[in-house]
Amino acid sequence: MLGGVASISVGAFLIILGLGMVGFVFYTAYDAYNTFRVEVEPAASIAEAITVNSSILIDMLVKVAFLAIALAAGSVVLSRGVDLFRGCPKERG
């Protein structure tokens, strides 16, 4: 596949890229945690309150799903970089 020097350099690049992706996810999550404020509108019944304020929940779920996908992608890139950097074994057992 790749030569020794090429494997190490590509692995180091993927490690840096993966760490950057994971760091971005943690920074974004921390920033969202610090700036998030819930503004609940008053309602006459529980059903109306859930219906009116469900957009807050949906917005939070979309953001959490994005962060989860970005974290998974970053960890895969980081894992592949570590494998290339140290020399991936022929067989995993």
Image: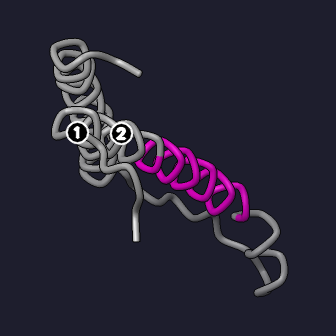
**What secondary structure is the stretch in magenta mostly built from?**
helix
Most extreme residue toward the bottom is 46
**Element under disc 1:** loop
Task: Give the label on residue 80, or none.
Answer: 2
Q: What residue sits 38% from the left and 40% below the top?
A: 74
Where 14 falls versus 38 (above or below)?
A: above
Q: Assess disc 2: are there few (<14), some (14-19) or many (≥20) residues with their C-alpha within 10 Å of its C-alpha.
A: some
Q: Front-most of 71 and 62?
A: 71
Locate the C terminus by quadrant. Answer: bottom left
Quarter of image, res 66: top right
Which of the two residues, 29 or 51, is positioned nearer the viewer here?
29
Q: CA distance from mark 2 to mark 1?
A: 10 Å
Q: Indicate whether 8 appears above or below 32.
A: above
Image quadrant in which the N terminus is located: top left
In this rendered view, identify the residue nearer to me: 22 or 26: 22
The three-letter amino acid code for the residue at tag 1 is Gly
* Three-letter amino acid code of the residue under disc 2: Arg
Q: Which residue is mark 1?
A: 87
Q: Which residues are magenta?
A: 54-72
Q: Is residue 80 shown above or below 52?
A: above
**3 is higher (above) or lower (below) than 62:** above
